[in-house]
Amino acid sequence: MLAIAFPVDLRRCQALGLAGTAFLALGGETAGALPTRDLLSPASGRGALGLVCVYFGVVLLIAAWALLGKVVRGPEPPTPRALLVVLLVWAAPLLLAPPLFSRDVYSYLAQGAMVDAHMDVYAHGPARLGGPLADEVAPVWRHTATPYGPVFLAVAAALSALTEGRIPQGLIGMRMVALLGVALMAVALPRLARHHGGDPAVALWLGALNPLVLLHLVAGAHNDAMMLGLLGVGLVAARGRRYALGVVLVTLAALVKAPAALGLLAVVVIRGRTDWVRTTVTTVAVATATTAGVTALTGTGYGWIAALRTPVSPNNWSPTTLLGRATTNLLHALGSDHLAPFALPAWRAAGLAVTLAVVLFVWLRLRPGPVHALGLSLAAVAVLGPAIRPWYALWGLFLIAAAARNTSAQHRLVATTGVLALAVLPSGDPADTEQFALAVCGGVLAVVVLWQAHQASSAPALERTA
């Protein structure tokens, strides 16, 4: 019998993933979301090579993660502690790399500088700040108010004061904040999995070592890491004796980004099995007090509630936004110019209604357990909301990873991750034909290298069975 198999163990997976993130960091030096003074044309030799290098690294990382899944679900799975070491090794090359896959981190720094300068970030965009930092913000966001809550703005303002507005130090600081959020996610996942009868190692593999975490939360330094980290440890605390602390932590997560507020519903379900009314009243009271206290301490006010209507970027992929724009164009073509302005708001309202219906269906009919239900609800918010980005998938995926026990659900998460990990250019800009071709070249080159490694490892096995 022929034994043709790619040799898989923890050490090889760790080395392959490290090679992937090292190529990512190297390619990012010329193809990432660099400061404007360092930007290279994708058509230039260094820019083209960097883009190829990044996608070569992405495919290696995806392969390492998929192979690690075989190890985790094998007869001798690694311990959660060993997987945390793998996470640290994979993340290490990205810590000092330039921002990748998005320029949002520059917006965070500009907003922090505005708060530090006592400017109203809920009324004005970074253009009001002016100067070199505002110039680094993507043009579509320079005149846009922030939708982020007071917890994140307080962190960004403190970082701005600490670094005195210097961009390199600010980028490193914001990445450290994101890394702390990822660490909290990794702490919470095994505990949440145990509470739901799941495998802690599988939960860590799916939810923390996930390529989307490394690409967008670590390399991209997105504040979603902070939101998910606080949400995860809040749910863990709520299951134990620290119920009030759990409510506080989940509320803090919502005061980073609003979707985490759904976590309060999970807290009520977790703790309210015997006295729903009392648990609900207590949860609302603690969450309200936390919100009022944090808002008073930060001094940013409640403008983030109105700022949730912040417009979305022109190239976002949300189904409701795409349908709204298509309907707008159709109405213009049909001569119904008076109806065209209502198409996009109507589709977004429909998306909100469908989201509410899905959330109610999950909690009232499916009832898969509070953490799993929360993950499915956040996934619905991400998909059906007015804007969607690859890292938004982590809102639901993080919690579903802790609760999903059947193999088919895990396979769906892996497939979704693989597709989304390849979806955005390292510069964060939309791809043109040339950039798309370069990205494909990098990915194909990685596949060829992996195939050659597979063939080389298979040859000794073939000789032994001859």
Image (cartoon, rainbow, N blue to C red):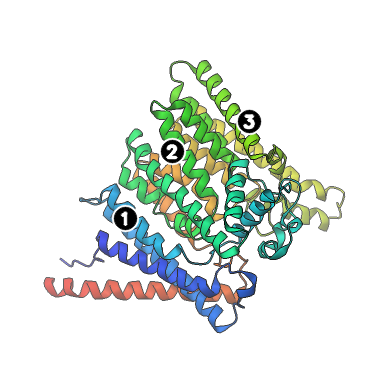
Sequence order check, earlier mark of 1 and 3: 1
Q: Position of residue 187 (x, y in %)?
A: 38, 43
- The residue sitting at the bottom extreme is 45
Q: Mark 1 points at which residue?
A: 85
Q: Which of 45 and 92 is in front in this view?
A: 92
Q: Which residue is drawn at 71% across and 45% down?
A: 347
Spatial separation of the CA atoms under disc 2 and disc 3: 21 Å
Q: Name the residue under label 3.
A: 292
Q: Which of 139 and 296 is in front in this view?
A: 296
Please indicate whether residue 129 sits to the left or right of residue 398 in the image. right
**Mark 3 residue type:** Ala
Q: Do the residues labelled 2 and 3 touch (CB within 8 Å)?
A: no
Q: Residues within 10 Å of mark 3 (few under 14, many from 20)?
A: few
Foreground mark, 2 or 3, reads 3
**Mark 2 residue type:** Val
In which quadrant of the rendered image does the N terminus lie? bottom left
Please indicate whether residue 454 sits to the left or right of residue 93 in the image. left
Check residue 233 in the rendering and tell me which mark sits there, or answer none. Answer: 2
Q: Which residue is drawn at 58% across and 67% down?
A: 33
Check residue 350 in the rendering and tell me which mark sits there, or answer none. Answer: none
Q: In this view, does 246 lie above or below 227?
A: above
